[in-house]
Image (tube, rainbow, N blue to C red):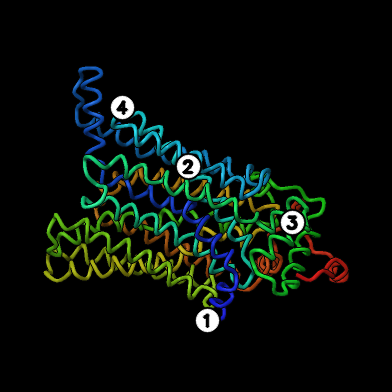
Amino acid sequence: SFLALNQGLLESPVLIAAIFISGIGGTFQFGFHISVLTSPSPFIKELVNTTCLQRYSISLEQWEVTLIWSFIVSIFCIGGLLGTLCAGRLSSAYGRKRCLLLNNLFAIGGAGMMLLSKTAMSFEMIMVGRFLYGINAGASLSVHTMYLVECAPKRLRGIVGVSVSTFLSMGKFSGQLLGISELLGTEDRWPWLLGFSGATALLQLITLPFLPESPKYLLLDRGDRQGCEKAIRRLWGNRDHSAEVEEMLVEHASMKGVRSHTVLDLILDQDVRWQFLTILVAFTTLQFSGINAVYLYSFDVFRTAGIPTHQLRHVALGTGLCEVSTSMVCVMVIESTGKRLMLYRGYLCMAVTLGLLTLTLYLQIQVSWMPYCSMLLIFIFIFFFSSGPAGVTVSLPGDIFNQSFKSAAYTIGCTLNWLGLFLLGLLFPVIVENMDYFCFLIFFVFCFLSGMFVWYNVPETKNRTVMEITAEFQRMHPNSGSSGEGRSRPPEPSHIKACTTTKF
């Protein structure tokens, strides 16, 4: 039950500290920078024009300012892709904790660029700052998730994994909240808004050294059993964790002689083909689910419903708050519900909601009360997105891949995330211009097909080890391959019992 799980979490205060410390400098940064540019965009465009006028005596045309602005927005994705591609290899070589620590330097450097950009009259500094922020967000998206999932005991793995997306939602909401004109969204204070990430990075840089390294990394990657035992006692308390340690030793024994696999190894290995397809579908649909389209059209829907224009930004905070609160509710139900059910139910309910939203937007001119239905459907869609795909997808690679494939799986998943974000930013304006609200039908197809894929092809992960989940994938797809070099077979139980005499 949730109360029992909550009690188990309260008995592990260091694990709670790990959730908050890794989260505030982890996926919080990614969410913050997705939403933070909305408010100061007029001031940044003015800085671009003023800089060119003073420096080159040239007054830019509107399309030129828009082009520079688009580059400022999109360079974040380029930095994110670079950070993701480097994070997997670096976290395997130097450890999850050390990688997170060093990653904060990029955010602090980016914050310095943002704070000085207006004084220096240099929009180029904003570009550099966004690029550095992108590297930080790309690395933290994968390393933060790996670190937390590996630090959690099996019974709390779902709750801890959902906290990754909760901090992402909190980052989005914080960017919206701090960007209102009553706080930092003004002409004088916008550099402090863009530099806010430096404070959260500094907080993690100061506090993270007091936390232990991931126990799984210590045992499975470095072979440091003594360090693993010490980390487990600090994170999980002094209770008897021998059963869970035994499962870790099973995985450790099965990986002897197996190197850490590359992205290419994972793609080509037939034995993990369906796990790879699961990551491919889940992370692609995360961006092409329609959530960004829903946020875009929310302003028009609220305006049509009679909300004054000057109040729209405050009302839009409700959508961000809905995402945060739903993500927190997801924490309470994930262990009793299971990730598979939350994924396919979320996708299919999102598909139905998008279909209805397309219909209500089409009828809102003919029927006076239809905009209120559209407003309700927007919040329903955000609810199903936050309680399903958003809460489950980010931590999914850590659940379905063993340690030798884990870094490569996170690299692939986060790369798909950044490529999807970049392509959506590039193509979405064109799609909206040509299809208007019928663009939701494209996202309807993505959500429906992904829901059916998960329903028929993905096993439940609740209360199962990676080895058990791998065996279930092979049972569901018996022809997916049986002789790959990367296959990791567990040894006989008698061998395991001999290895697990120590109690924790």
User: Could you classify mark 2 by the number of other residues whose Cα lies within 10 Å: few (under 14), some (14-19), or many (20 or more)?
Assistant: many
Q: Upstream in the sequence, badge 4 or badge 1?
A: 1
Q: CA distance from mark 3 to mark 1?
A: 31 Å
Q: Upstream in the sequence, badge 2 or badge 4?
A: 2
Provide residue 241's location: percent of width, then percent of height: 72, 72
* Residue picked out by circle 3: 227
Which residue sits at x=48%, y=76%?
A: 333
Single out the mark in the foreground, 2 or 4.
4
Q: CA distance from mark 4 to mark 3?
A: 48 Å
Horizontal relation, residue 218 to residue 200: left or right: right
* Residue picked out by circle 1: 3
Single out the mark in the foreground, 2 or 3.
3
Badge 2 amino acid: Gly
Disc 4 element: loop
Disc 3 element: helix
Which residue sits at x=16%, y=58%?
A: 311
Q: Upstream in the sequence, badge 2 or badge 3?
A: 2
Badge 4 amino acid: Ala
Single out the mark in the foreground, 1 or 2.
1
* Residue picked out by circle 2: 80
Disc 2 element: helix
Provide residue 425's location: percent of width, then percent of height: 35, 44
Badge 1 amino acid: Leu
The circle drawn on residue 120 is 4
Q: Upstream in the sequence, badge 1 or badge 2?
A: 1
Tag 4 and tag 1, C-beta contact below 8 Å: no
Horizontal relation, residue 310 to residue 440: left or right: left
